[in-house]
Amino acid sequence: MESLKPPSTLASIGIIARFELVRLFQTTRGLLSIAAFAIVWYFIFKELIYRAAQWVSVPGFRESMSDMFGQIGLANLLQWPVAEFVMFWLFALLLFPILTVMITADQTSSDRSRGTLRFLTLRATRDSIFFGRFLGQLIIQCLLIGGLLLATFAMAMWNNSDNFSFALTSAIIMGTNLLIVVLPFTAMMAFFSASVRSSRLAVIVAIICWGFSLGLINYLAMKIPPFGVLINILPGTQLPDLIQANDWATLKHAWLPLLQTLGFLLLGRTIVQRSSL
Amino acid sequence: MSLIVQCNDLSKQFGSKHALRGLDFELYEGAPIALVGPNGAGKTTLFSILCGYLQPTKGEVTLFGHQPGSSALFGKVSALPQDAQLDPRFAIAKQLGFYAQLQGFSKKAARAEAERVLELVELKEVLDEKPGALSHGMRKRVTIAQALIGTPKLVMLDEPTAGLDPRNARNIRQMVAELATEATFIISSHNLNELERLSQTVLCLEHGKISQHSAISSKSSTGFLTVQMDVADTVDPTLIFHNLPGVSAVTKPQRSEYVLQYDMNESPDLDLQLLRCIAENGWSYHQLIKGKTLEEQLFSNA
């Protein structure tokens, strides 16, 4: 047998990322996760988005609700032109960060505790494994977000097909934004997954660290106001601003999650490079 | 013979515990190499450093001139790490195929390669099973199969036959012996009989240091014969053996086993004389080994 040329780092990242899709779509646990995700969103669509969209569509309702939403800082939410997307946007921004933390918690942790990473590191660099898994999780998030946007779009068309172009634009803008929203959470879980030996522990540690850091930064900012800038290291910091924005103006908040993603990826990579297997 | 492993002053510390202490050795391609030593001697630590799983605290190590874990070694170096397990969620073919793809096989060829290596360990029938459906021994053989994907030049097996039944252990030994012409194997095991049959070179670790690094068969003029035989408790063959020409010492390392040290120049056919002596005295023997057993070589002071 002739000796083969191993794939380049980029090609290895691609192979590893594709295998994450196999993990989701061709394993029992992966299919159960999709089923659970679909059921949760089915009820959100059926009981919340569909009904709320009907209320929002009632003439005069938007105006009366604008006052109430304004008091809780959501004045601009109703500026989105398609009612179904208004409600989807609200629920997606609230739920996706939490779902991302749970879905992407096992990027490398269980493979490390099981020893499977030892088989992999004989065939791929640690960078390929780390970034391949991250990319794989991102592709999965894209598919989930895409599926939900498609469902919202279908619902909007079912209720009022005149909104086609508005609905399409909203779907594209929201899809882009949601992907940017989940990026730092996915990178944060790549970091925590590289630091501990189980996905459950990764979720617990991530939540504790996030909550503790938020409390500490708020306390420090109260005593010494310049410390308030540290809040920007926490994923999701831009969400209150994002929910207030409309249309492509939403992307002006993208720099922060992109920087956070870069920071978490660098930290995670350092951990992966230095850790013993 | 080309150099495959080079260690210079290699040390590894876990906290205050020294797992490896300044190892200096070189290994060359060829017949399987045995890595032996008692529990806690540092065998698995050395394996882990050679595979790039652990970083040494001090010193240098290279495989084929590259740092362990370097991408230049992908497909060239493979291993059976101790206690590493396959992912229980995927079928065996899926996982081995994935590893094969990472080594450069196309998706289609990867499946064929998975079949080939499973056939080597006589487990082709489990191709579409998940690891959870296999016995401990079968899982071990599958993890040995992953080390054979492609055309590795160096295969490191940490306790490859531990937990296997005698028949499968024998099959693995046979497989290693057959593949030894294509790749150099480094095998760590507590089973000295197994290593004796497979290896030509032995690396003995004790308390993190190399206590011996030598070829199993010695070329000095002093020879050894090991005979295993049953005699009545009232009889002591030691004195009789001592009187054979050229014999300088006779030891009895364990019950029913006698080791004769002799001058090979003075008595080149001592084995024949020994057999004649046994026959004349009406004893029966089980086994006659030219040389010492590996256990004797490593752990006797003679």
Image (cartoon, rainbow, N blue to C red):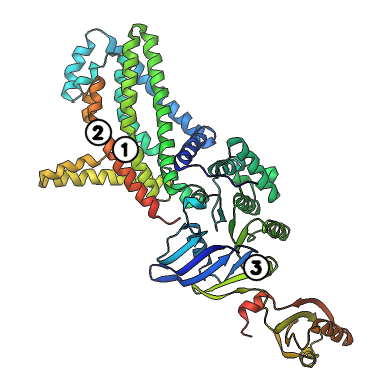
Q: Amino acid at mark 2?
A: Trp
The local secondary structure at tag 1 comes to: helix
- Look at discs 2 and 1 and give the one toward the viewer: 2
Q: Which residue is mark 2?
A: A255
The residue that appears at 30% across and 41% down in the rendered structure is A262
Mark positioned earlier in the residue sequence (2 or 1):
1
Q: Amino acid at mark 3?
A: Asn
Marker disc for residue A184: 1
CA gap between label 3 and label 2 equals: 60 Å
Q: Is residue B192 visible?
A: yes
Instruction: Look at label 1 and name its amino acid.
Output: Pro
Q: In terms of secondary structure, where does tag 2 sit? A: helix
Image quarter for residue A252?
A: top left
- At 82% from the left edge and 79% from the top edge, which residue is drawn? B285
Q: Is residue A130 above or below residue A275?
A: above
At x 56%, y 41%, the residue is: B101
Residue A97 in the image, given as x and y percentages of width and height: 33, 34
From the viewer's perspective, is residue A175 above or below residue A115? above
Separation of disc 2 and disc 1 at Cα?
11 Å
Q: Secondary structure at mark 3?
A: loop
Image side of residue A216 versus residue B238, left or right: left
x, y percentage for residue B200? 66, 69
Q: Quadrant of residue B103?
A: top right
Q: Are marks 3 and 1 on the same chain?
A: no
Mark 3 burial class by Cα count in 10 Å: few <14, some 14-19, many 20+ = some
In this rendering, would B185 be left or right of A274? right
Q: Which mark is residue B191?
A: 3
